[in-house]
Image (cartoon, rainbow, N blue to C red):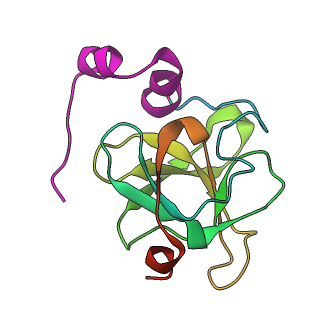
Amino acid sequence: MDKVRKSNEEWRAELSPEVYYVTREAGTERPFSGLYNDFYEHGDYYCACCGALLFKSQQKFDSHCGWPAFFDEAEIGSTYRVRDLSHGMVREEVRCSRCEAHLGHVFPDGPPPTGERYCINSLAMAFKARSDTEAEK
């Protein structure tokens, strides 16, 4: 996967202020406000910054946490983790492997088979629908 590297000025010119805040400044959208929180169409979720595949609809579940939740990434290496000590907590931040965009955090309280909950900001993703047949692949 080719890395995408841009200056803050380039990202600002390409992204909306809200997407820039979440993905480039490690911001968070308000709980239950995101487009994909209660969204269950068949398809794939891509990075809002660089278009890299992040998650598949088959990996999404309703965690009632206020943000879209996934139990795994689309492919091994789609994302990477960084230790986050902000807000007086120890968490694992999730970033896009291609452009290093902040996506959200991962927690050890998800369903099988991984037991993980990727808690991801809707603003960090773009969705592309697939048919039921394609979604099974």
In the orientation shown, which residue stands out farthest toward the right? Answer: 64
**Does the image show residue 71?**
no
Q: Quadrant of residue 111?
A: bottom right
Quadrant placement of the N terminus: bottom left
129 and 102: which one is in front? 129
Give the residue drawn at x 69%, y 52%: 39
Q: Is 96 a magenta residue?
A: no
Residue 105 appears in the figure: yes
Q: Quadrant of the C terminus?
A: bottom left
Determine whether, in the image, residue 127 is placed left or right of residue 68.
left
In percent of width and height, residue 113 lies at 64, 85
> What range is drawn magenta here?
1-25
Image height of 62 relative to 104, above or below: below
Principal secondary structure, stretch drawn in magenta: helix
- Work out which residue is located at the far bottom of the displayed protein and give it: 113
Residue 78 location (% of width, % of height):
37, 62
Residue drawn at x 78%, y 62% is 62
Tell me residue 46's x, y (percent).
41, 51
- The reply, left or right, for residue 2 in relation to residue 84 is left
Which of 128/32 is in front? 128
